[in-house]
Image (cartoon, coloured by chain):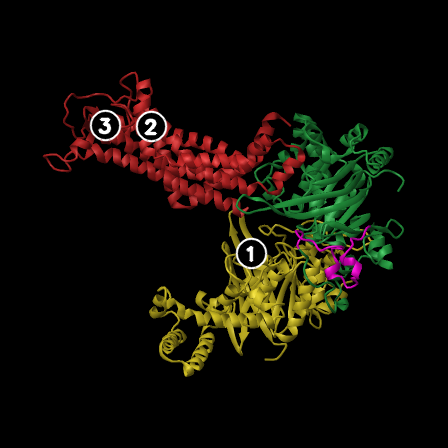
Chain colours: A red, B yellow, C green
Amino acid sequence: MGRWENFRKEIDPTIKEIKFMLYKIRKSPLSLAGASIVVFFALLAIMAPVLAPPVYDDPFQMPLVSYSATPMPPSAEHPFGVMNGYDLYYGCIWGTITAFRIGVVVVAASLVIATIIGVIAGYYGGIIDEILMRFTDIIIAFPGLILAMVFVSVLVPTGWNPLDAVLAALILVGWPTYTRVIRSEVLRIRHEDFIEAAKAVGCSDFRVITRHILPNTIYPILIMASLDIGSIVLTAAALSFLGIGAPPGFSDWGQIISYSRQWIYSPKGIHAYWYGYTIPGIFIFTFVLGWNLLGDAFRDILDPMIRRR
Amino acid sequence: MEKNENLIEIRGLVLRFFTYEGVVRALEGIDLDIRQGETLGLVGETGCGKSVTALSTMGIVLPPGKIIRGDIRLRKDGKEIDILKLSENDLQKIRGEDISIVFQEPRAALNPIFTVKDQIGEVLLLHRRKELCEKVLKKLEKELKNAKGFRKFILNFEKSMYQTMKKNPKSLKLRIASKIPILRRFQNPLKDIVKEEVVRILEMLRIPDPQRVAEMYPHELSGGMAQRVVIAMALACNPVLLIADEPTTNLDVTVQAQILHWLRELKKEFKSSILYITHDLGVVAELCDRVAVMYAGNIVEIADVYTLFKNPLHPYTRGLLESIPRPGSPLKSIPGTVPNLINPPPGCRFHTRCCYAMPICSDVKPKLVEVEKDHRVACHLFPHGGSQNE
Amino acid sequence: MSEAPLIKIVQLKKYYPILGGLLRRKVAEVKAVDGVTLDIYKGECLGVVGESGCGKTTLGKTIIRLLDPNGGHIFFKAPKDALEEIEKLMNEGYTNSPRLKKLLAEYDLSLYRGKKLKELRRKMQIVYQDPTTSLNPRMLIKDIVGEPLKVQKLAKGEELRRRVLDILQRVGLTEKHLYRYPHEFSGGQRQRIAVARALVTHPEFVVLDEPTSAVDVSVRAQLLSLLQDLQKEFDLTYMFVSHDLSVVEVISHRVAVMYLGKIVECAPTEEIFKEPLHPYTQALFESIPIPDPAKRKERPPLTGEVPSPVNPPSGCRFHPRCKYAMDICGKVEPSFVDVGQGHLVACHLYTKEGKK
């Protein structure tokens, strides 16, 4: 039995599962829409260097194409217009990467912290559970936006990138929600026979947790996480809009909209400089919508799949 | 109605489940009669389709299942009702009142936050509201005779409410009044009457200490008591058919013996028919009048209980009887496993495991034929009924 | 019996605390196993029967140390002279003697910890009742069955694969089943996988916790045959816990009947089914529905409900429901009486005090 054949056989069941998931996505039009949107943005992010070649060393820095403060409407040269001197087209394309980065980093980090704390609290119970859960409760009390402002003002002077400071703040206030959910899943599963059987075989606690408990409890928070990616991006955009977050000229959708703040009401009328907030707004809206639909799709797929079988 | 007239007639029922993995041919042409006042045992293993058959008689077809064709008729008060053609509304009137069902796990059937009297009361209020209103009104009338002043005013108010309830239970007046704090109390006489009824039903069903049991919550009941309560709920409106889907499988054997004995006693008083689904042949022998054996979506043998145990004809029935462990003799089992119903074997579905299999068995599906009086088999060993190929 | 039992259980106790009150203190205890003394001999299958709440499952799990006992001793593979010495030392009150301590540390499972406990897992295993919940739904069969070997460091790589395949074939499955998930199998097949997992380390003692209850009737016999064959082939000792007396009758050599945390009767299978002595045993046997409509029962053999194990009745625990109850039954707990042929019964109908 060759090693390649062994490997093929190993992944065969996983392939079957993935095929089943794809089938379910195909069946529901909304899930398909969500998946398509996310895939579209992913492609946009991958193709960014091709679609909008970097001008400076830091590819995220939007190119300054004009020294005039007045926004310029979309034209052949600048398809999305120019705002505050920056090329919006460039900003929006590279903003996609930023959005993915924000969403994935915050959610992934929150998941990791939450899983560790939640699983330990749920598995061991007793006083460890009490301490960890009360600690979690304290963290929940922190207001996210204000904490972000505090982090930015405290950490930026020490050399942090303001966007990283915002991410750190969002991670800090993001993990408690997942902790509760994964803890309750662990509690549900802790007394199942197969967990006891694993102990009967001699598995260490670590092995029981990683091999038995985690694979069976992680799905609900994965679903929550995919739904959250959208809202995290929205929150970060809001913070950037307020001026907390991306440094000046950074390709970030919220940052771009913040430049249009002064130009919403103008002598020429409220829609004069629509491209400044509408276009990045559409990007944000569609991105968040795509992730929300995809998150719903995951929930529909993963739940009945477990139930059905 | 004559005793032996058919209460439920199922003819040619074909039911399939449309799943991701394929089409599951769950039922392939079921013909079954349930007679007035009898206890029919439906025996078969997991996946043979007995629960699905029972639920179909109530018009319950859970997705992704669909009834492809077939006929289910209920005879009530001399009228014939076509179950499969009824609307959901009409079906709801039948469920609980004419046909009731009891499931395997009593704790799953009882809502943990409601007491016994609330749960049985719910069934009564759903189907017997008018009669209960009459009883309340009678009580109110009696009290009105001696009432004076403020009390009289309240009684008259309540009387008008119940008269409205009798005519139109969903009237706006009642719904509003039931939300306003003090007016809400007009519901109290009804609650008292319901409790009285519940206690009466529990008493009639010989459940010990009915007053106390009525006030209990499900978690305070033992397994056997909980199942009795569920059966009381099912019998509350005196249905003509009680479907029992493995009701004693999860109970201890001594408790099971108590409940089987209790059901036998009740049978003498209540005139309901019982469709008793089980995989335990001992229970069937203890309780049933007739037995139908199912295998992989087909009925393979129907006979009265004495005949079935004395002279089982279908190889599957014989296999089942032989696989009951007997001390001293070696363990016998039916070789092979239950077939996958997405791709069932052609012809007779049992032929792959049958030691009497003939070439025709993999070709043609055997029909249910009458071999002797009231004894039907679906097997090519008995093709014309009456002749045996031994 | 002249040889020492494989497992000797002495006054084993397992209580579950009930916490209550504001400070979650222990307000009561569920006395699941309340002083069980039992011998299990090598190569036999001991059936343990009883109804819900009698503690049979708890007993099985406590013996293999999945649960920690609250009292009593579990002697495993102790030679006869060691057992005699332990008994002598304990009877004479030398509870602190270093010799006793050394003997106990070696043979008494209730004192095992850490590494010794982990090694014990190789020799004692369990098969659960419900094969749907006893297998990790997200693990491949080959990993489920291979895990004991991996964790116990008994094999790896190619050798592990070989042993897993070997045991799977022994229970009637094939190589193509290795790379599948549990939900792709029927109940009977899953139970076989559970058996394979239990046997892959070649244990000496296996607790079978109602292994056939969740399995179809036509497949039950296959599973029982398999268990019997495996017992002979691997020289296993079984403890077969069940509430299904017909199954126990076929597979067990001896049967112990439990009621409310205690053993009330213990005898070779033929003996106990031919002549059950304890009133509870009699009622239990009479309650089984017989597959013969001519033999219907006139009345249920046992009325009432099982009392709560939190507050078991005084004296003999069965006395409130027993039709032969005498005065002494409510006061004094009957001890075991040997009525001959290895038939032990704990009932005042047979004790010296009761017969007076």
Q: Are marks 3 and 1 in contact (CB under 8 Å)?
A: no
The picture places residue B70, in percent across and down from the top left corner, at: 53, 65
**Residue identified by numbered label 3:** A88
Name the residue at 36% across, 69% down: B174
C218 sits to left or right of B5: right
Is residue C331 inside the magenta stretch?
yes
Find numbered disc 1 in the image and state the secondary structure of the residue it sits on: helix
Give the CA distance from mark 3 to mark 1. 60 Å
Tell me, yes or no, whether dots 3 and 2 are on the same chain.
yes
Question: Would you call the spot at circle 3 few (<14 residues within 10 Å), some (14-19), or many (20 or more)?
Answer: many
Check the residue under mark 2 and report the chain it is in.
Answer: A
Q: Are marks 3 and 2 in contact (CB under 8 Å)?
A: no
Residue C73 appears in the picture as rendered: yes
Above or below C227: residue A158: above
Name the residue at 76% across, 38% down: C74
Find numbered disc 3 in the image and state the secondary structure of the residue it sits on: helix
Q: Nearer the viewer, residue B381 or B309?
A: B309
The picture places residue B27, in percent across and down from the top left corner, at: 58, 59
Is residue C125 inside the magenta stretch?
no
Residue B379 appears in the picture as rendered: no
Question: Would you call the spot at circle 1 few (<14 residues within 10 Å), some (14-19), or many (20 or more)?
Answer: few
Q: Which label number is shown at residue A156?
A: none
**Mark 3 or 2 closer to N-term?**
3
**Residue identified by numbered label 2:** A166
Above or below B227: residue A277: above
Above or below B103: residue B159: below
- Inspect the image, locate mark 3, and give the three-letter code of the amino acid beneath it: Leu
Check the residue under mark 3 and report the chain it is in.
Answer: A
**Residue identified by numbered label 1:** B108
- Asked which quadrant contains residue C12, the reply is top right
